[in-house]
Structure formats: C-alpha cells, structure tokens
Image (spheres, rainbow, N blue to C red):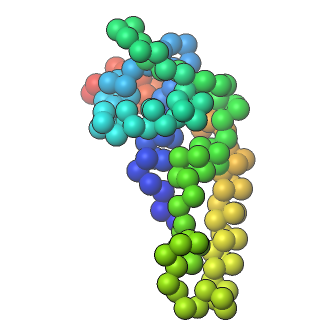
C-alpha cells in the first residue's frame, strides 16, 4: 500500500501541533521544520480543519492548534479521512472496472483483508503515542532545531 503525500503531510503537521500544544503554530514554521511546501501545507491545513482535527485562527497573530486532545486522535482515522475512498486496485472501484477476472479472482478478497488489517493496526495508535515521551522527535520539531 502506498500512502499519498497528502497523508504524509497531515501526520507530520499533526505531530508538530501535538509537540507544541502550549501555543498556536504557524504554517511557515511547520513548512520550514517539516520540509513541506507552504502551498501543499495550506491545502492539508484546510482539509484537517474541515475534518475537525485542527482549529485555525486567521490574522497577524493567527495560527493553528489541535482541535482535540492528541490521545483522542487515532492515526487510522486520520489515514481514512485524508486518503478518502481511493481504491487500492482497479477491482475495488465500482466504476471504471474493466478487469474480466473480478467475479472469480480471490486476490480481491486477500487485498481487502490486508487493507482492513492495515487500518486496524493504525487504529491502535494515537497521535499522543507518536509524540508523548518521544524526546528526540520533540527536539527535532523545535523551531531552533529546524533552522539548522
């Protein structure tokens, strides 16, 4: 399974916000620290705000913060919400499926089971588990460390 760039950015963004729960963080600092284009980041910020993972404030003193506690954000949910219903292979798609084997192929079931197992594994991980107690990560996500 391949994770989209958008999901990768979303998880880095959420980890950065979790590492800085005490303040609003800015798009510019996240872009610099996490090596993300501000344009891509803006799109992901907008999506995560709509999905209620982030609270955002506009203006000169604006920024963003987590909309809920990090222990209430399950990584499996983030992946599902950001990835959407992208079919893993053609036979998962209702439309545009031209595979002549779809009615008899057992690979579809095996792949479906694998995808469900993948998400079940991520459902057991919270944002807090990725950040809390991970001093090396938190140090890397400090604006001073990022400027080096």
Residue 75, image quadrant? top right
Asked if residue 80 lies left or right of residue 57, the reply is right
The reply to whether residue 46 is in sight is: yes
Image quarter in which the C terminus is found:
top left
Which residue shows up at 43% across the image and 42% down it? 9
Asked if residue 104 lies left or right of residue 11, the reply is right
Which residue shows up at 48% across the image and 57% down it? 3
Which residue shows up at 50% across the image and 84% down it? 98
Vertical placement of 99 versus 5: above or below?
Answer: below
Vertical placement of 83 versus 50: above or below?
Answer: below
Vertical placement of 138 versus 21: above or below?
Answer: below
Which residue shows up at 53% across the image and 61% down it? 86
Viewer-proximal residue among 9 and 97: 97
Q: Position of residue 85 (x, y in %)?
A: 57, 58
Q: Position of residue 116 (x, y in %)?
A: 69, 63
Q: Position of residue 143 (x, y in %)?
A: 37, 21
Q: Position of residue 100 (x, y in %)?
A: 55, 91
Furthest residue in direction top, as rendered:
61
In this rendering, the count of numbered labels is 0
Viewer-proximal residue among 35 and 110: 110
The reply to whether residue 136 is in sight is: no
Asked if residue 94 lies left or right of residue 138, the reply is right
Furthest residue in direction front, as rendered:
95
């Amino acid at each position: 399974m391949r994770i989209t760039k958008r999901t990768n950015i979303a998880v880095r963004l959420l980890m950065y916000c979790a590492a800085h729960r005490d303040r609003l963080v800015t798009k510019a600092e996240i872009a610099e620290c996490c090596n993300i284009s501000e344009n891509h980041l803006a799109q992901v910020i907008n999506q995560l705000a709509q999905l209620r993972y982030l609270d955002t404030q506009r203006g000169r003193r604006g920024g963003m913060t987590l909309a809920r506690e990090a222990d209430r954000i399950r990584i499996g949910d983030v992946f599902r919400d950001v990835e959407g219903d992208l079919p893993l292979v053609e036979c998962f798609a209702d439309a545009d499926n031209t595979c002549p084997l779809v009615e008899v192929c057992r690979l579809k079931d095996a792949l479906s089971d694998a995808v469900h197992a993948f998400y079940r594994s991520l459902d057991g991980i919270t944002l807090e588990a990725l950040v809390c107690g991970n001093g090396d990560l938190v140090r890397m996500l400090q604006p001073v460390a990022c400027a080096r």
